[in-house]
Image (cartoon, grey):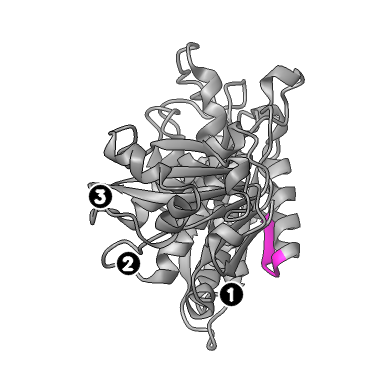
Amino acid sequence: MDITVVAGNITENDADTIAVPLAQGVRTLAGDTGAADQALGGVIKQMLDDDLIAGKAGETTVLPVPFSARRRIKAKRVVVYGVGERGKLTANGLRDRLGNLARSLRSMNAGNVAISLGETPSGVAAEEAAQAAAEGVVLGLYRFDKHHTRAADKPAYTLGNVAFVESSTRRAAQTRRGVEAGVIVAEGVNFMRDLANEPANLMTPTIIANRAQQMASEVGLECRIIERAEAERLKMGSYLSVAAGSIQPPKFIVLTYNGARTKGRYIGLVGKGITFDTGGISLKPGAGMEAMKGDMSGAASVLGAIYAIARLKLPVNVMAVAPCTENMPSGSATKPGDVVYAMDGTAIEVINTDAEGRLVLADGLC
């Protein structure tokens, strides 16, 4: 799916489906919604007057374009999407509305789509609104179904290309900048989602380190993987105490982005990377333990963040640190009451081995 921005009249767009906004409380249709209504012979206004549509947040109404209107509008259908109360829409709200719209469009097999954003939310710059809208579309369409082998578990349809339509080339240029940024941010989030959603056997510390190296190569980041032997030389005793019970080798990931003109100081992002957390010797209850594959979401988040930062070419220096390991019980695992030492020499008594997050983050912050 490609997301583009074009200038022109939305009713003249060649898309299979056009989507126009409607705010709750509006009685007079204007802009692209008014143009679509006029092309359809006033059907949107009639439905509004008859209280068949209201513009409520999340509301979507599908209107097939009759043959008699095909000279005035090229699309096969018009979708009116509600944005909520007039004057109260925010950037976050717009993101939510566009996510809901994108899912609705996919479910109806809408093909290629042209979308009007309508009025910019009060107090929100045009670029910011466009960024939120693009984020909504990309995030809203996300699904993690790569391991589903039954066709019934996969979406029946996919969405074609999406074009945001603006009335002028000046406004289109502003929207385009926002959309480009929004797509990058959303793809960074989805990169993180993909990492966090994988089962633990397919997202070990080694695998996440390999993904980090591949991503770093793609976007021009410096990547350093600190292996167990080097971590021992660096005296990362707090971090290594968590890894002691697992046969999976720990991987301490460091990604560096140099975007500022001067070297200066770095913004530090540190994320917990426990690829599976049993609690260790202080074992968690079995019920729900499968969800502990997600205990590396902090690491996934900082990897996704620096991925987006690099693609956006932000003028800052950033270092992302992801100490990754499993927390497993075994004969070699850290025991309650053990004393371990962090990189800075601080002694830590481990009372409960299920407090592993602060142990890996201690050396991550050092």
Q: Which residues are magenta?
A: 219-226
Residue 100 included in the magenta stretch of the image: no
| Residue position marked by numbered label 2 in the rendering | 124
- Name the residue at 54% across, 60% down: 10
Residue 60 located left or right of residue 225: left
Percent position of residue 234, x then y:
59, 57
- Name the residue at 51% across, 38% down: 63
Picture layout, residue 24 above or below residue 292: below
Category of crowding for the residue at label 1, using alpha-carbon neighbours closer than 10 angstroms: few (below 14), some (14–19), many (at least 20):
few
Q: Earlier in the sequence, mark 3 or mark 2?
A: 3
Q: Earlier in the sequence, mark 1 or mark 2?
A: 2
Mark toward the viewer: 3 or 2: 3
Mark toward the viewer: 1 or 2: 2
In the image, what residue type sits under mark 1?
Lys
Residue 349 located left or right of residue 279: left
> Disc number at residue 27?
3
Query: What kind of secondary structure does the magenta stretch mostly adopt?
Result: strand
Category of crowding for the residue at label 3, using alpha-carbon neighbours closer than 10 angstroms: few (below 14), some (14–19), many (at least 20):
few
